[in-house]
Amino acid sequence: MKKIVLIPTYNEKENISAIVNAVLSFETGYHILVIDDGSPDGTADIVRNLMAQYPERLFIECRSGKLGLGTAYIHGFKWALANNYDYIIEMDADFSHNPKDLDRLCAALDEGADVAVGSRYVKGGATENWPLDRRIYSKGGSAYTRIITGMPIKDPTAGFVCYKNKVLAAINFDNIKFIGYAFQIEMKFASWKLGFKIKEVPITFIDRKIGISKMSKGIIKEAILGVLSMQWQSFTGSFLKQIKKIRTNFF
């Protein structure tokens, strides 16, 4: 079973060596693909130096500039599919996601799930070191997403996610439009709409201790408007299919 962890980076020189060493220390044989968006702090150079220590387990794809989380992950998804990985995992570079939880996410797929979500909001899940406003935005956004979309996922904005190869192969990435929180929602929504089984695995999310958070008001706004857009497109798509079916049967 080939498993790869995708780690998008932008100015993560303080964290990248530690997270790479932590993930690749497991005997379960994870690989890592770092997708670096032209970090001016030298993150990519650090990864290149580490590649000599981890031949055939550590890889890097460098892009020309800061192009957004969503496009970085899609770049990584395509690379992982082309290289025939079975389990493909999204993970932050800053230890917000505990590498020790990787085996638990993969175990959920071994047990029959198609997508495993590292969830803060199921029983046993938690957050640490979050200010009150961050907790309000996150929990409120999750509730809002469930109400608007009907998607039965308690942590739809979660960014610690493990996909089976067949899920990503079935998703048309050209239809994935968002880059921040809404990207995470959109990927889960697409997986759910395609009928794949999604399981939430409780994790403790710890706010980054080193480096600068990439959260912004623009990302939050994208999520609010993005959820409405996703649901509207899903509704109109289903409606047009029904009209086409009626016309075909009638005529």
Image: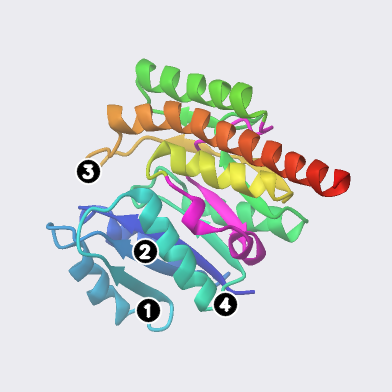
Magenta span covers which residues?
A: 151-177
Which numbered disc flags the more N-terminal residue, 3 or 1? 1
- Cα separation, mark 2 vs mark 1, equals 10 Å
User: Mark 3 and 1 residues: CB-CB less than 8 Å, in contact?
Assistant: no
Position of 34 with respect to 239 (left or right) is: left
User: Mark 1 and 4 residues: CB-CB less than 8 Å, in contact?
Assistant: no
The residue lying at 25 percent from left, 65 percent from top is 63
Residue to which mark 1 is pinned = 54
Front tag of 1 and 4: 4
Residue to which mark 4 is pinned = 84
Q: In the picture shown, does residue 47 fall above or below 13?
A: below
The residue lying at 52 percent from left, 53 percent from top is 100
Is 224 contained in the magenta span?
Answer: no
Is 165 contained in the magenta span?
Answer: yes
In the picture, the disc for residue 211 is 3
> Disc 2 on helix, strand or loop?
helix
Identify the amino acid type marked 3.
Gly
Identify the amino acid type marked 2.
Val
Which numbered disc flags the more N-terminal residue, 4 or 2? 2
Residue to which mark 2 is pinned = 20
User: Mark 4 and 3 residues: CB-CB less than 8 Å, in contact?
Assistant: no
Q: In the picture shown, does residue 139 fall above or below 22?
A: above
- Res. 160 in view: yes
